[in-house]
Image (spheres, rainbow, N blue to C red):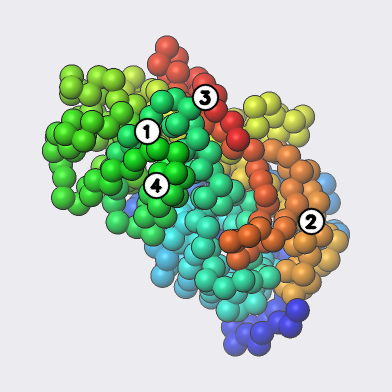
Amino acid sequence: MTTPPSPLGAERTDGSSVKIGALVPLTRPGWVEAGRHLLAGLELAVREVNAAGGIVGRPLELVVRDTAADPQRAAAAVDELARMGVAALAGEYHSVVARAVAARADALGLPYLCSSAVLDALTEQPTDWVARLAPAQSHGWQIYADFLLGAGHGRVAVAAEPSVYWASGARILRDHLAPRGGTVIELDMRALTPAALCDELVDHGATALLLLVGHPEPAVPIVKSVRRDHRLAEIMIGAPAGQPEFAEWATLLGGDGAAVPFLRYLPERLSPLGARVDTALRERLAEAPSFVAFEGYDTVAVLADVLRSHGADRARIAESWPRVAVEGTRGRIRFSRTPGINVWQWAWTPVQVVDRDPAVPDRFRILHAG
């Protein structure tokens, strides 16, 4: 692979540390809680790498930049990190932001291991510079669609906001459900209040409502409105993007936030490594870690292994993706070329559909696995 010329500085790190640029949403309108969990996983793994001797005797250093869910801000951060001489990029939760990061990293010849974003089209063209740990949206959301059908929900309404990510999710659901007799009714939340949404759900006879909207606004007001409408007592509310994963959901909604199925990327039982990391993350976060925290940890585990084996040269790092074989917290991580995906992809991390137990909202129930 030929490294494109970069006007932004050195192609490898210098100085005493090996630097990784970490892109994380830490302020609004980014999903701050997801960013905090992602960063906790990244930082824990870096601490463990350094406690074990670093990268061939050199400390691993995380250079963190807040994306605030802003693609332009994230692209500018990539330029800055490239000038600083980072060996690789890691992180990001929001798909539209990760797409901007991937495009800039590809243009600069800077390896990027995407931790948590799932949009299938992470790059427009095939690239060797980008790899991803999270499952593609089409994979996870098809599993969610199978769950809906198995639970008897063939008439599904989606409350949607405009976004490439939400539009892609609605299309995946529609394409998977339609051949199996299902129907997807799209309701534009730019034009509807939560109360008007309830009227639409009744008129359409929907048995399930999926939240393809931001959190906490307007997701929380929608849930409260639907839960309080006696006409919709039997409707299932779902959130495939994972809004109920985080403690803020339960804090804001209480019992109303239970029994809302969502996707998470964890195995039914953690391995010994996963269990050890779970304990350390609980201590670090002072709460149960989400799957996003494990994604952060696994990102650094992969990059540290690559850096030890291939050094900090950017081209050599990118060339190593197909040779990765790392034991992560959720299984053995290998990257391959997956049809329809333009980046190196771990196919696949475990996928579950879970919800918060109405009897004990802090406890999760596994409803379906794929």
Q: Mark 2, mark 1: which one is toward the viewer? A: 1
Residue tagged by mark 2?
Answer: 324
Q: Earlier in the sequence, mark 1 or mark 3?
A: 1
What's the amino acid at mark 1? Gly
Which secondary structure lies at badge 3? Answer: strand
Q: Earlier in the sequence, mark 2 or mark 1?
A: 1
Residue tagged by mark 3?
Answer: 367
What's the amino acid at mark 4? Arg
Asked which quadrant contains residue 205, the reply is: top left
**Label 4 crowd (10 A; few <14 / some 14-19 / many >=20):** some
Q: Mark 1, mark 3: which one is toward the viewer? A: 1
Which secondary structure lies at badge 4? Answer: helix
Separation (CA) of disc 4 from disc 2? 35 Å
Q: Residue furthest top?
A: 359
Residue tagged by mark 1?
Answer: 154
Q: Quadrant of the C terminus?
A: top right
Residue located 60% across and 79% down the image: 108
Residue tagged by mark 4?
Answer: 174
134 shown above or below 251 = below
Q: Position of residue 188 (x, y in %)?
A: 23, 49
Q: Mark 4, mark 2: which one is toward the viewer? A: 4
* Residue 106 visible in the picture: yes
222 shown above or below 27 = above
**Label 2 crowd (10 A; few <14 / some 14-19 / many >=20):** some
Q: Earlier in the sequence, mark 3 or mark 2?
A: 2
